[in-house]
Amino acid sequence: MGARTNGSTRSQLISSTSAGAVLARPGSGGASSARGAGPAAPAAGPAQIEARPTLKLLEAAREPDFIEVLGSREHNLRIDRLEVPKRKLVVFTGVSGSGKSSLAFDTLYAEGQRRYVETLSSYARQFLGQLERPQVEHLRGLSPTIAIEQKSASSNPRSTVGTITEIYDYLRVLYARAGEQHCHLCGKPVRAQSSEQIVEELLAMPEGARFVLLAPLVTHRKGEFKDLFEELRGRGFVRVEIDGAQHRLDDLPRLDKKLKHTIALVVDRLVVRADERQRIAEGVELALQEGRGEIRVELQADEGAGARRRRPDAPLLFSAARSCCGHSFPELSPQSFSFNSPLGMCGACNGLGTRLEVDPALVIPDPSRSIREGAIAPWASAMARGEGWTFRIIDAVSKACSVDLDTPWRKLGAKKQEMVLYGLSGKRISVTWGKEGTETHGTWGMRFEGVIPNLMRRFQQSSSETARDSYRKFMSERPCDACGGRRMRPESLAVRIAGEGIADVTAMTVKDAYQHFARLELPGNRQKITEGVRREISTRLSFLLNVGLDYLTLDRSGPTLSGGEAQRIRLASQLGSELSGVMYVLDEPSIGLHQRDNQRLIDTLRRLRDLGNTVLVVEHDEETIRAADHVVDFGPGAGHLGGRVMAAGTPEEIARDPDSVTGAYLAGRVRIEVPEARRAPRGWLEILGAAEHNLRDIDVRFPLGVLLAVTGVSGAGKSSLVNGILLPALGRALHNSTEPVGAHRAIKGLEALDKVIAIDQKPIGRTPRSNPGTYTKAFDQIREIFAELPESRARGYGPGRFSFNVKGGRCEACSGDGMVKVEMHFLADVYVPCEVCGGKRYSAQTLAVRYKGKSIADILDTSIEDCVRLFEHHVALRRVLDTLVEVGLGYMKIGQSAPTMSGGEAQRVKLSRELGKSQTGRTLYVLDEPTTGLHFEDIRKLLGVLRRLVESGNTVVVIEHSLDVIKCADWVIDLGPEGGSGGGRVIAEGTPEAVAKVQGSYTGQFLKPLLAAGRSQPRA
């Protein structure tokens, strides 16, 4: 959160106002009497005299109505002066790479963060890290800033929608205070257990059994507990158990106060005998008293040293309050429902809900092959060699099980398949080696455990990470069979409120959970006790509904959320905080949102504004732009051709501005035209019985040789169908991928394709050394051209001499980076140009070699359009550069570092690489929301690239909400009708015109008026 830069001003205002009020009171001895200037003046005098200075102070202290930006030069920005209105909904728009995010995030938000960190002590700053000051001359009127960016909610598999929104924290409290404990064995409500019943159960154990009686004192709490130990010692107790080990109270280990400990009092060590009944009864009563109604009994193997450590057997738990089916239940607490705590998590999967297990589908990737042909992947290399110990074992198994090694795997009987995969249940096989009748011949009898148990054992026992990685290739995450994927122990899952367990509630969608709590009525005092908790849960659920996330389930894993979903979850959390006077910076919150839900998001943004906040949104969605109070349009181009403010004002003013590209689209002067004709499919790819996630066992036909748009409301099943089934299934069939494939029966029509490629907006590289030239291999050809120059050949320079990644021709002072980092300790690190090479990355000798007057460093700083003219006679290189120009990246420097490129630019670089390849006409391209971060003009260019791919005979599948793309598609598959459990069905399919005629299709309803208008939205 940004710095509260006007905090001191507010303090001055309060002080000044208070002083003014004192001076205005007649007879109060105000300023005059304080100076000893005689009797007080008449009442009106001081008020009139002091009114003007007070008004001036008030005027000076008033919060400005604008954020004033002077001299912003961050990245490609060239802004001399800009005023951004405060307490308004402001949209930054413009073509991709024009500088919107550079101003919103890298300048306004970054400076707010930096000013906040500057208010902290130098001691605190050394732990937080230093933030570099943005390249801006002056920023005035900056409010505390909160950024809600497009990034994954969490990479932690324990993170869920419920934990991110804190709804699950309130659910844990609710179930701990109002839940009704049921027995997980018989399902009946648990009942109290008296001390006599506990004694009888202990005496029912085998005669002579030894056990230790313990009273729980501390459970998973931090501290040293010196006072507790001193008290116990004073009361005559001798031993305690600390974290599973027994210690004498006069010889205790030192506990780390930063770690959690579990402590129990050792009440007595007993033996089950009839004559010990009285002693056992006394011990039980004392343990119940010390353990606040709870007892733990540890069975012991023997006396002496071995008895100091608990046996691996599960301890017996008893409670004076809760017991059923011979099992006692501890007192409920919020930790009992936490899958991150040992008190609540499932012991088999440690609260993850999944376990890493050997996947038969990965062990047998191609069932059409025989074992000799490598059907069993872990045995494939041994079968190819035809010798070795593994081969002899396989041969012995085939003889023992009558398995023909040359029969296709799918034609082997189920019983034979099971014997090979899971072993022979203890039956021995005879493994022979050497030639019979020779000294090297021998036979060994061994038990065959099966392929899958063997892989699992090796994975668990191996200490080599390399070996574990090789076994991990045959494993996948499977739902835990102990908890059914619900993460918690059975005792916690058996606690219910209104017949629903906590796992049942988290499995609901946000919409269903909201309705559940709206009608929830609890008996007696529990209704009043839980009133506040239920209100908090319902409020947070309503915020999620407001931002269009009604289809998400509360147990949805955080890493599986898209960037747009994660951003809207954080937006919902901010609504709950109800802060005022804050500047919120959002990065395209409409991503992944269907037009049907857009208005709900806009209403949410307006609500944030109406609380007195400044809401600054980087956005390309036309509906959001039209709903803004103020729009700032950046341009005119991208990269070094952009960075300027082309227009600023209301949406109507932007539409009238002749210099604004955005305004031209808003006013209808420029539009994305509907194609005059649709391409006819040249074949079909069919997915039968798609049932991944919420898909309803549907059959879907994908046309080939066309631009296909898969549409539907958020959560309808688009990603489950395309990314969960189609993409991994094709990858496995065409490229031997091991990625898990979603549930389906079969896929038909694979023979029409030879490869599948997914193109996303992820950066083309993670370091500044990656650039368009290196990614498209154009820079390799440029280095070869330089190596062929007469001067290079005279000096013996090869292509490696002109690489900034290896020693030889690069500047070693900066290792080819061109910049040197100077550590400033308590200040931000400063990056300065290398003094040796002047920021050019290469040594002087390398820079002396020139091509048409330009050194290799000059080439990296040249735009792609200029490079086309520079290398016009080099056909192969010219073809690569031409494709970069065709996708609209001619303005970009060929050496522009990857981290400075926008998502849209990175995507187009990848597309240009595909265009530069030789096309077979049998490739299927998959793009998931390719219009993310793209302006109307960028979408027009993207559609041109996609058309080129299709015209080469390929198939392009896009998951998309943008009506500009949908109306230009040849075929549309619309899923729905709702999200979550209300979706998963094909609502409409066909050309956009055919889909627009389907009344039950939300996409069709929005598409219908646009097809008539021929543009992305109705004109204003």
Image (cartoon, rainbow, N blue to C red):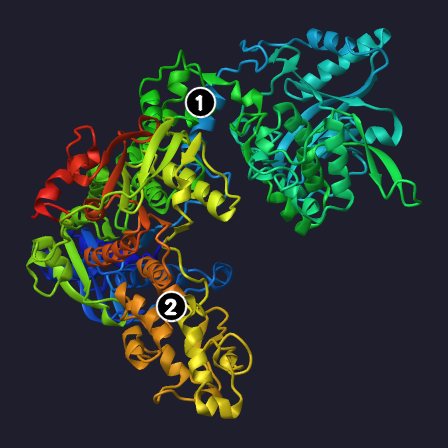
Label drawn at residue 846:
none
Q: Position of residue 941 (x, y in %)?
A: 23, 59
Sequence-first tag of 2 and 1? 1
Q: Does 691 appear above or below 772?
A: above
Q: Quadrant of residue 169?
A: top left
Real-space Cα separation, disc 2 to disc 1, in angstroms: 50 Å
| Residue type at tag 1 | Asp
Q: Quick one: 777 or 844, which is closer to the camera?
A: 777
Q: Quick one: 275 or 607, which is closer to the camera?
A: 607
Q: Quadrant of residue 1009?
A: top left
In the image: residue 619, left or right of residue 835: left
How many residues crowd mark 1 within 10 Å: few (<14), some (14–19), many (20+)?
Answer: some
Considering the numbered disc 2 on the image, is that residue within a helix, a strand or a loop? helix
Q: Mark 1 points at which residue?
A: 504
Q: Does 428 appear above or below 1015?
A: above
Q: Mark 2 points at which residue?
A: 772
The residue most toward the right is: 439
Q: Where is residue 157 in the image (x, y as percent from the top left)?
A: 50, 40
Name the front one of labels 2 and 1: 2
